[in-house]
Amino acid sequence: MDIMTQRIKIQIFPNDQALFQLAATDFRARVLKVLNNNPFFSLALSGGNTPKSFFDVLTSQDRDIINFPWNKIKFFFGDERYVPASSSQSNYHMANQYLFSKLPIDPKNIFFIPTDLTDPNEAALCYEQTIRSELVCKNHVPCFDLIYLGLGDDGHTASLMPSSKSVEHYLKDPKHERLVESEYIKNLKMYRVTMTPRVINHASNIIFLVTGSDKAPAVAEVLEGKEDPLRYPAQLIQSLDGETIWYLDSFAADKLKKKSSYEY
Ligand code: 6PG
């Protein structure tokens, strides 16, 4: 997918701690820049395990907690497992444990995906209304200031799984009207709710945080392999008119052919 590498920025770090330290500095600068001209900063978080270390860095310094405008950030989720918010599998539960509970954040600024509704599709529709009402829209699509994403070792991102309905819908019609969709993921034996590529790609900035050697094959396929977004949905993700950045540690970047041109 060499086309992609021409339009995105890749930075490789010697290890995950160096990556998260820079990502935290980068995050703070982005928030302060947007808040210079806007009343709030809209941020969508990814789930899984990688964000835990990033959140630890963000919340490690008291000075960063007290002096930073956390209450001017609106927090959203790029995807969610359809489990109760109290479940250890919940992305909201993880973000609350590692981030929200450690910061002076008003709960009204946390917009979680309502997995307490019986019907996952109802939850997806409800969340779509939420992001439409909370965010500024461009071409009728809500625009996030920043969306963080992870990468699965199978090339998925958010809950855009290989050969999933959402991916098929987007490939058939990039202007497909749904911004949030739900789907039963057979191999995970659970429903997932996910933002679609359409709303993700409308974000001003998209940042992938990917660490670990288990991700190296997927990173190489997504960034340098042949174009096959049904198999590698992360290939669908590029900000339409903003920045798309991949922050990789050296282990996740290990199979990239052109890694020397990306070193941080
Ligand atoms: C989720 C995530 C998912 C995640 C990747 C990577 O709900 O699991 O949103 O897209 O980012 O699967 O997960 P790890 O960070 O745990 O490797």
Image (cartoon, helix red, strand yellow):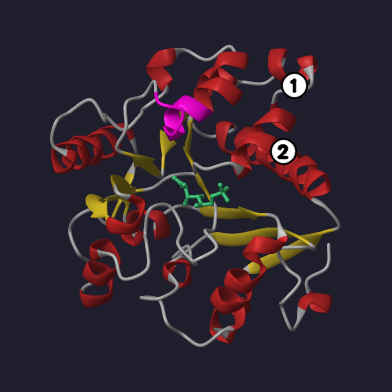
Number of other residues with Cα within 10 Å of mark 2, as a class: few under 14, some 14 to 19, many 20 or more: some
Q: Position of residue 73 (x, y in %)?
A: 51, 27
Q: Position of residue 192 (x, y in %)?
A: 30, 46
| 228 up-or-down from 155: above or below | below
Residue 88 on the magenta segment: yes
Q: Position of residue 52 (x, y in %)?
A: 63, 35
Q: Are marks 2 and 1 in contact (CB under 8 Å)?
A: yes
Question: In screen coordinates, is 147 left or right of 195?
Answer: right
Q: Amino acid at mark 2?
A: Ala
Depth check: 147 or 204 in front?
147
Tell me which residue sits at (51%, 22%) in the image: 96
| 49 up-or-down from 39: above or below | below
Nearest to N terminus: mark 2 or mark 1: 2
Q: What label does residue 24 carry, if any?
A: 2
Depth check: 113 or 129 in front?
113
Which residue was labeled with disc 1? 64
